[in-house]
């Protein structure tokens, strides 16, 4: 294979582009928007820098590996600094819990909630380490192209009781309800419901314990910029403002892509980092096999959407850490409303991002940058007019942040804007406005997820949240490793 074209410059597309270009494959990366990053977009308004996310960087070694492929160091392009605590968890009754990989601090935090759960937490950590080894280290970058691969993985999955949910598994080890929430909420960061997501995803705890939680100075957008610099130094080509109209095929082969403006880019292989349904339904509209795949995809469960409020305010807030989770009065009920019932509840759980505590340059002097994020049902479950209800939800979210942390928040706001389900749909082509593609249930994981290589078009590949192993920076970077393995080791003719 001499050439490849990748659709979409999100983390998955960028990671794969770097791998291919490092291996000598002439790679062109085409991006519909005016900036690379996909969901990791960035806005600059009134002197404030607003990262769209993802803002929690874990598994730094997986990122460093992309630079090491060509003998370089990530530090040449990106400054990563540790975040501690990883998150401060806060409940409506005022309880705080600082989540960290400092074992002594973490055990003290657990003891404040329930001393009897310290031993149970130790057993949970052992479980998390075991599923991390199996689910991330051994299988994370392995493509599941046939059911036989799934059968081989099944004994280990069954040994770890993968059919249980993360919440149910955590509950086997600890009894305190707040601690159960503290050890299970992570699946929400990759689009999964803690009540239904496979227990294998408990590996995220071990991933964070070992690798830490990091921040890229200047924002996640600077990690994206560093990846672009690396790719272009290697000789790769990035095309912005270049939406793809079609993936061109001849028989059971992809021949390249045609851009919306009519330009055709020929390539030996085509990779989509775009939304799965958009790829099959729109970009491959002329392929019968793709339309059959579309029908199957549309019957699957998709992750919820998100509603984010970005705001820049007067003042600095040394008492508010970099990441906070503001739990609401309900946990199970709220999750059921979002994932099952498609209800926009009056209560909500919020993820609050406060980068200026680590990086004051994200705001003008004496000011702070924040965003507050709430999971909400996707458009298939809650087909509302977000242009109409968005301002109402925005105010409710800011009111809650004010009630819990910044009493005069409305008086302090210098600039603000929101981003919701319709934006995910319109800007990113996300099916139903889903923020994380397919929901990470056991029956939508590994072989049951979209394959890294299409079953019918031999030189059409996939990377990103919709394929194995799933969403989140570690997930999509691992998907790039799996896809690169297929592309570089196997002939395409």
Image (tube, grey):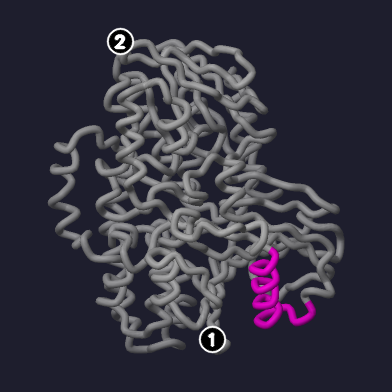
* Residue sitting nearer the eye, 413 or 385: 385
Q: CA distance from mark 1 to mark 2?
A: 60 Å
Residue drawn at (51%, 44%) of the image? 430
The kind of secondary structure element at disc 2 is loop
Main secondary structure along the magenta-highlighted residues: helix
Q: Is residue 33 left or right of residue 120?
A: right
Query: Residue 392 in magenta?
Result: yes
The kind of secondary structure element at disc 1 is loop
Q: Which quarter of the figure is the C terminus placed in?
A: top left
- Which residue in the structure is indicated by mark 2? 493
Q: Is residue 443 left or right of residue 227?
A: left
Residue drawn at (27%, 70%) of the image? 169
Q: Is residue 142 above or below residue 26?
A: below
Q: Which quarter of the figure is the N terminus placed in?
A: top left
Residue drawn at (47%, 38%) of the image? 275
Q: Magenta segment range? A: 391-408
Labelled disc at residue 70: none
Q: Position of residue 192 (x, y in %)?
A: 39, 59
**Which mark sits nearer the N-terminus, 1 or 2?**
1
Q: Is residue 368 above or below residue 112?
A: above
How crowded pointer 1 is (Cα within 10 Å; few <14, some 14-19, many 20+) is rated as few
Labelled disc at residue 95: 1
Residue drawn at (51%, 57%) of the image? 383
């Amino acid at each position: 294979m001499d050439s490849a074209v990748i659709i979409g410059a999100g983390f998955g597309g960028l990671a794969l582009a770097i791998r291919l270009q490092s291996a000598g494959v002439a790679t062109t990366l085409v991006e519909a928007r005016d900036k690379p990053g996909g969901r990791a977009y960035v806005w600059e308004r009134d002197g404030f820098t607003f990262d769209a996310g993802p803002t929690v960087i874990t598994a730094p070694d997986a990122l460093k590996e992309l630079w090491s492929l060509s003998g370089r160091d990530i530090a040449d392009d990106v400054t990563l600094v540790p975040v501690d605590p990883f998150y401060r968890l806060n409940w409506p009754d005022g309880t705080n819990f600082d989540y960290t990989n400092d074992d002594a601090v973490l055990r003290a935090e657990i003891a404040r909630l329930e001393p009897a759960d310290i031993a149970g937490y130790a057993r949970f950590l052992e479980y998390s380490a075991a599923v991390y080894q199996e689910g991330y280290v051994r299988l994370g970058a392995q493509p599941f192209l046939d059911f036989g691969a799934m059968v081989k993985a099944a004994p280990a999955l069954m040994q770890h009781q993968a059919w249980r949910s993360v919440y149910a598994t955590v509950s086997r080890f600890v009894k305190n309800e707040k601690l159960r929430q503290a050890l299970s909420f992570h699946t929400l960061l990759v689009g999964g419901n803690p009540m239904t997501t496979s227990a294998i995803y408990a590996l995220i705890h071990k991933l964070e314990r070992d690798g830490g939680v990091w921040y890229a100075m200047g924002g996640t957008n600077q990690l994206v910029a560093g990846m672009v610099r690396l790719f272009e130094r290697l000789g790769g080509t990035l095309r912005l403002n270049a939406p793809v109209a079609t993936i061109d095929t001849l028989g059971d082969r992809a021949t390249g892509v045609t851009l919306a403006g009519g330009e055709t880019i020929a390539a030996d292989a085509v990779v989509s980092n775009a939304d799965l349904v958009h790829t099959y339904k729109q970009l491959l509209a002329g392929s019968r096999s793709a339309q059959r795949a579309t029908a199957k995809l549309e019957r699957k469960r998709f992750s919820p959407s998100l509603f984010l409020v970005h705001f820049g305010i007067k003042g600095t807030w040394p008492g508010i850490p970099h990441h906070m989770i503001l739990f609401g009065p309900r946990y199970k009920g709220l999750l059921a409303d979002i994932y099952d019932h498609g209800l926009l509840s009056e209560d909500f759980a919020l993820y609050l991002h406060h980068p200026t505590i680590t990086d004051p340059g994200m705001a003008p002097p004496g000011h702070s940058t924040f965003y507050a994020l709430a999971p909400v049902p996707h458009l298939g479950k809650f087909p509302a007019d977000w242009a109409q209800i968005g301002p109402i939800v925005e105010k409710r979210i800011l009111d809650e942040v004010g009630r819990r942390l910044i009493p005069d928040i409305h008086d302090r706001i210098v600039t603000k804007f929101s981003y919701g389900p319709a934006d995910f749909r319109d800007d990113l082509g996300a099916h139903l406005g889903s923020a994380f593609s397919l929901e990470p249930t056991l029956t939508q994981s590994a072989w049951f997820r979209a394959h890294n290589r299409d079953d019918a078009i031999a030189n059409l590949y996939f990377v990103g949240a919709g394929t194995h192993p799933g969403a989140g920076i570690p997930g999509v970077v691992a998907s790039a490793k799996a896809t690169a393995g297929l592309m570089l080791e196997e002939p395409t003719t």
